[in-house]
Amino acid sequence: MKKKINIAICGLGNIGSYLYRYLIKHKKQLTEKNRSIPNILLIYAKNKKKKRNFTIPKKKWAKNFDEIIKNNKIDLIIELIGGAEGAAKNLVFKALKHKKHVVTANKALIAKYGDQLAKIAEKNKVNLEFEASVCGGVPVIRSLKEGLIANKINKIYGIFNGTSNYILTSMDKHNKNFKEVLEEAKKLGYAESNPRADLNGEDVSSKLKILSTLCFNSFLNNNIHVEGIKNIDRDDIVNANKLGYKIKLLGFSELIKNSIYQRVHPTLIKKSSYIASIDGVLNAVIVEGKPVGQSVIQGEGAGPAATTSALVSDISSILRGNIKFPFSISNNQRKNLIFKDINERNFSAYLRFEVLDKPGVLSNITRVFSTNKVSVKRLIQNPNKNKGSSSIIIVTHKAKDKSLNKILKSIDKKSYILKKSKLIRIDDD
Amino acid sequence: MKKKINIAICGLGNIGSYLYRYLIKHKKQLTEKNRSIPNILLIYAKNKKKKRNFTIPKKKWAKNFDEIIKNNKIDLIIELIGGAEGAAKNLVFKALKHKKHVVTANKALIAKYGDQLAKIAEKNKVNLEFEASVCGGVPVIRSLKEGLIANKINKIYGIFNGTSNYILTSMDKHNKNFKEVLEEAKKLGYAESNPRADLNGEDVSSKLKILSTLCFNSFLNNNIHVEGIKNIDRDDIVNANKLGYKIKLLGFSELIKNSIYQRVHPTLIKKSSYIASIDGVLNAVIVEGKPVGQSVIQGEGAGPAATTSALVSDISSILRGNIKFPFSISNNQRKNLIFKDINERNFSAYLRFEVLDKPGVLSNITRVFSTNKVSVKRLIQNPNKNKGSSSIIIVTHKAKDKSLNKILKSIDKKSYILKKSKLIRIDDD
């Protein structure tokens, strides 16, 4: 007789609802593939009475989390509540302590408490799986833990946020400004009503911390440089195009001489590069490792359908009884690597200064560059129409990040500066 | 105490040698990640005395396969001999019958005998793993079996052969002809001294059969249309460029109305498409499924390093005790789907006729099209310099494949035809 795995789904929003119906509909196929039966025993939703276009048998409704956690029959809890604190945190900690497997799509929780949770999971020999927390349907975590297990990874980077990529793509293709495109994205369901975490880089930051940990067998680390896309305007995109680049919000985690650098920021990337071709809400992850070389995984990064694909891969792994360490290796084998901030890392960069059009400004600006020993590769001065002002674009050779920022700060103090200057790093490694 | 898995490596060419050294060097890390020790107990090579830049302890050399198969200590046999018949076939059948796990990079063997082998593996509860047989370091099989397990797949296609992609890319970028580029590829190690299977589509055909089986839960099926790249010349590439296309050797397997169509052929694909951007020896696989949508996996398709990455992912799966059906589901759950040949499938196509430059030819050609009810979308006539001959390029609207071939055949009989005409299908689904 086949083993049965009793499941509780906690959280019944868009994703929870999609997953519930998927599991009901595909029970037979999943049983055939994994040799155990996925049986939904309990469901918890904040609002039971919400109108849904499907019905849930009365006996499946749980009154509260305790009813689920203390139920000895429950083997697996699927957490779809969200947020690093509160109910989700409480549920997942308790679930693992009660020796339940956990599958979650909660990147904020894993990025913050993943190490503590993994420790409990390992001690209690249960799974903690979170494929759905990073890049939706893109099976990047399973690829790192299994398909690419042979590799010593030295770099992972890519487009990890569909909302911001959609906005940058639309600004570029339709020559629209940030606000217009954001409104459109909301209407199309590509941006949430409160898209803060998508736009300020926080969402990418959580995902990148999780990926770093998996790539480098390290612990989660909060030393990460994070910038979002809110300051990118149409002019930057036009300038980038003229220089042969696209602007993308990228996350990077790289191992350089035994130190890890984590960073999330808008990046100028050559038009001809693969990553520049990833448009709209797609996600793309690039992994560089030995012996495999460079691998790319690309797909739908969000939405109930893609997320369900990831959740079901985790659920299937548990159905097959494939007990694994949440972060690939045992806690006591994980390394305390050095995470450095990017001050000392070298970048070439695009800097943009909006200045009063008067004599001496250009020479003053270039003097600040030379004082800071940053050499200029290209300089473009565009007079703004009818305004007595100019836009000065400088592309630098490689220089320390702190020198680039120092230049920005010191020029921003000058009286000829009309608005806050900009620094966008270029990816030309 | 940790479990030990005793391994025999059979075949010590480039790949076997790389794998051997990798396993020795990374024994500790693999043990940590998989909680079992990968222990190389025996090695078989045809030529023991070959000069190698590493040494193998005398006691590890096996005299013959029987010594390996009959050794009760051996848990896992890695087959790196190659070929669908002979020694490799003999070894893998016997190994599975003797309840040894098998890891192989042998696409020809799996494409031909995979169903029979999977049956034995399932009966004897051992693993038969073949990630390395398809697209080298690209973890496509593991992604289909695990990361994308939730999905009903309706199409898989892509670039599955690095040699032919390198040749087509070089012909395009450096405006060289087939022969020149092939010689270059041999010198660079991108083509074997006998590259027959790479150029005639056979290599892609084997890989595609394996992928179809995994995607559609069907049995292996030999109903597959296969063409290679040998007839593509510089003019075709130039013409394709003018029309907005690149030429790539693609493999497609697709489920259309409960029938599967398998095909391998040079394809005109829009320049702006993702697949057109995959240059050189890279491989790329595109999977379309529900609920995930479209996923892409790209990476190094060949070479000892990339292949070792794939082999080690299979070995690790066995180290973790992750017993699985070779083709995702049990033999008795696999379906006997209908595989149709492409005669009745609709394609738009590029046809090229080299003709004598005389009155009436064009009207004769177009008449053959209209007789066969194939409508012409574009027609370009290029007079060849000083030869009294012309090149006529026709791009059609969609038509049945058999109608397109009928046109080709009937025009090829005409006296004004100077050399064999060409038909290259266009991907515009």
Image (cartoon, coloured by chain):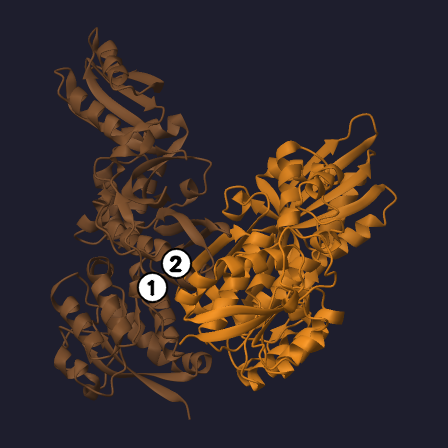
Chain colours: A brown, B orange
Residue type at mark 2 is Val
Could you say where residue B12 lies in the image, as x and y percent from the top left? 66, 60
User: Which element is circle 1 on?
Assistant: helix
Residue type at mark 1 is Glu
Q: Is residue B400 visible?
A: no
Could you say where residue B58 lies in the image, as x and y percent from the top left? 66, 65
Pick the front one: B20 or B84:
B20
Q: CA distance from mark 1 to mark 2?
A: 7 Å
Which residue is label 2 attached to? A140
Q: Is residue B87 visible?
A: yes
Q: Residue furthest front?
A: B58
Q: Which comes sooner in the sequence, label 1 or label 2?
A: 1
Are tags 1 and 2 found on a single chain?
A: yes
Residue A71, placed above or below residue A194: below
Pick the front one: B57 or A391:
B57
B59 relative position to A262: left or right = right
Residue B326, placed above or below residue A115: below
Residue A131: mark: 1
Residue at 70% from the left image edge and 70% from the top image edge:
B88
Q: Residues within 10 Å of mark 2 (few under 14, many from 20)?
A: many
